[in-house]
Amino acid sequence: MHGSRIVAVGHYQPARTLTNEDLAELVDTSDEWIRSRVGIRTRHIAGPEEPVDELAAHAGGKALAAAGLTADAIDLVLVATSTAIDRSPNMAARVAARLGIPSPCAMDVNVVCAGFTHALATADHTVRAGAATRALVIGADKMSEVTDWTDRTTCVLTGDGAGATVIEACPPGEEPGIGPVLWGSVPEMGNAVRIEGTPPRFAQEGQSVYRWATTRLPPLAREACERAGLTPADLAGVVLHQANLRIIEPLAERIGATHAVVARDVIESGNTSAASIPMALSKLVERGELRSGDPVLLFGFGGNLSYAGQVVRCP
């Protein structure tokens, strides 16, 4: 019951890059139109031979290596994804098999864009309760597989990738490295972001999501800081779901994190749904923009009009 902490991060993106100029050959759009409205320049696109579990396993393997751990050290695997095409085996089981993790509890978490922060909280609670000692928590999505490439309002947004964290129980006497979660949803607005149909396709009510995110989320994000015993001014970093730069920048400003590095990975990666937060966090750590022990607000929001946020300490 001593809490948990993040001990390592990792991320992975497919090699193929899709630029705004490439998209202009598919639909009626332009680099200027895309950058002025969503701030995205490029995104990475997985090939047909790169399923979600492969993206997730690459990121998970990097996090394990960064932690200096072997696969048998993990007893819980959680994969946050909304683009798993098959119902069974789930992505967590397939990732465990790819990485050689011998007998973990393996579960998928589908809360779309807020999936990773939900999964991180679930792993933290599981470790606190003593039901696991060390967890691999991954956000991975292949949004290109559910994108309507004829719809210029949504196809300019999406990308593919995965990000991962290794978490473990804190030693007695050490402050928890993962703060209390603040989570919830707005069910009556759940249809504002959706992946549905046969074949499944991503669609959203963009203006409704923008208004909700920029007005309703700032006080929730500040409450997540309060639950961790901090103010927004204490934060060293803010990693929001990388939905759209025109949402991220005003939201970060309204939270009041005046001294924080704000993740803007959406510019280079697009909206990667559940992968966006762990991938952006991993890149900030890798580049040295965040240091070990720095307090960082993670806040996911989107599909189902769900949200979840917590303050974590960098590994």
Image (spheres, rainbow, N blue to C red):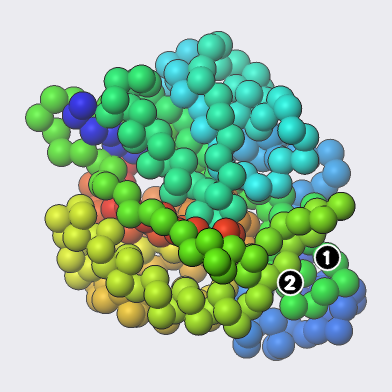
* Residue 160 image offset from top left, x and y in percent: 68, 53
Mark 1 crowd level (few <14, some 14–19, many ≥20, 10 Å Cα): some
What residue occupies the far left of the structure in this picture?
A: 173
Residue at x 74%, y 62% (from the top left corner)? 202
Horizontally, residue 46 falls left or right of residue 312, namely right
For residue 127, what is the image quadrant?
top left
* Residue 36 image offset from top left, x and y in percent: 62, 87
Location of mark 1 (residue): 148
Mark 2 crowd level (few <14, some 14–19, many ≥20, 10 Å Cα): some
Regarding mark 1 in the picture, which secondary structure is present there? loop
* Residue 61 image offset from top left, x and y in percent: 55, 30
Residue at x 21%, y 55% (from the top left corner)? 227
Can residue 160 be seen here? Answer: yes
Q: Nearer the viewer, residue 186 or 110?
A: 186
Horizontally, residue 109 falls left or right of residue 171, namely right
Please report contact status of discs 2 and 1: CB closer than 8 Å, yes or no: yes
Residue at x 82%, y 47% (from the top left corner)? 47
Three-letter amino acid code at disc 2? Answer: Thr
Three-letter amino acid code at disc 1? Answer: Asp
Quick one: quadrant of the N terminus?
top left
* Residue 8 image offset from top left, x and y in percent: 39, 36
Q: Is residue 6 above or below residue 105?
A: below
Q: Is residue 291 above or below residue 207?
A: above
Quick one: quadrant of the C terminus?
top left
What residue occupies the far front of the structure in this picture?
A: 188
How far apart are the two marked residues, 2 and 1, measured between alpha carbons? 7 Å
Horizontally, residue 225 falls left or right of residue 264, namely left
Location of mark 2 (residue): 154
